[in-house]
Amino acid sequence: MKLKLFIVGAILSLAAAGWFSLPLLASFNKVTGTKSLTSLDGDIMRGAYLARASGCIACHTSSQPNAKFLAGGDPLVTPFGSFIAPNLTSHKKEGLGNWTLEEFARAVRQGISPDGDPYFPAFPYSFYTGFSDQDIADLWAAFQTVPAVSEAAPEHTVGFPFNQRRGLFAWQFLFFQQERFTPPSEDARYNRGAFLVETATHCAACHTPRNLLGALQEDKAYAGSDSMLEDEGRIPAITPQALKEAGWTELDLAYALKTSVKHDGDAFGGSMSEVIKDGTSYMKKEDLEAIAYYLFNRDKE
């Protein structure tokens, strides 16, 4: 790690001075392409379901009146700046209309745009890297059906030094590891819950604390955190022990993810209510139960 920090510090200094281009850092964490991607038949319905579960609609559709579906989201105001999820419609200029399947896969699983620029980690590609080739093909098939919207989403508002996109290659070098999801057990329900929690719904993105550079503190997984979003407050721990101590049961949790009604009769607020309204409320009962089962039994691995 000391060597990595030295290399990154040196290259960031050069990049800030405009002397150096950082794409070479991508090679330190390179995942080989998958030649089978274009040979796969994407399932539109499965892709649409996965997009819902993965928060695509919640982030990329604004809550403003008359907002167009997947044409760009609301600002995510964080200490690093304000981020706005872009247009994901089939429009050829403002959306995904001119993208290829390979470019889509690289963006979703590697956090690299078609132009070769790294995405800000506000986009949870570090979780989506777990998607299989079939997952990507299904998502791609679904997004091809979204009507084109010609409106461009507003640009991010990010101050120096966080607005230096090429510096994000250094962030990826330090904190991003590409790895496809692998079932952790022989229990099918546990494995389904693990995929949904660790990859698709990316629960750790909010429920795990982050360091000063916005990377997850993996040794404190699901231990709760102070929200990176403005006015969100404290996000609760969802470790097995914390859930049980708070009075939750597996059935309570699965029901809450469907209805937004918590075990004590109160309702979720803030960004969690949006996650449920636009995402988990559309999910199958058995998938919500798998999520709860996994979260309650993670300590038994």
Image: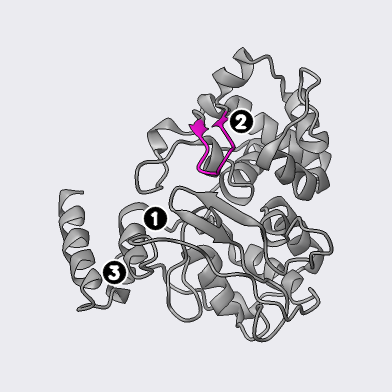
Instruction: Residue 129: tell me if it is visible.
Output: no
**216 relative to 43 in the view: left or right:** left
Instruction: Residue 149: tell me if it is visible.
Output: yes
Spatial separation of the CA atoms under disc 2 and disc 1 = 23 Å
Mark 3 packing: few (<14 Cα in 10 Å), some, or many (20+)? many
Nearer-N-terminus badge (2/3): 3
Q: Above or below — where is 187 with respect to 246?
A: below
Task: Give residue 80's position: percent from left, percent from top.
Answer: 43, 52
- Image quarter of residue 237: top right
Nearer-N-terminus badge (3/1): 3
| Residue labelled with disc 2 | 295
* Type of amino acid under label 2: Leu
Mark 1 packing: few (<14 Cα in 10 Å), some, or many (20+)? many
Task: Give residue 259's position: percent from left, percent from top.
Answer: 83, 35
Task: Give residue 117's position: percent from left, percent from top.
Answer: 43, 74
Element assignment for label 3: helix
Range drawn in magenta: 225-235
Say whether marks 3 and 1 touch (CB < 8 Å): no
Q: Above or below — where is 118 with respect to 215?
A: below
> Is 228 part of what is drawn in magenta?
yes
- Image quarter of residue 135: bottom right
Element assignment for label 2: helix
> Is 214 part of what is drawn in magenta?
no
* Type of amino acid under label 3: Leu
**30 relative to 121 in the view: left or right:** left
Query: Predominant secondary structure in magenta?
Result: loop
| Residue labelled with disc 3 | 25
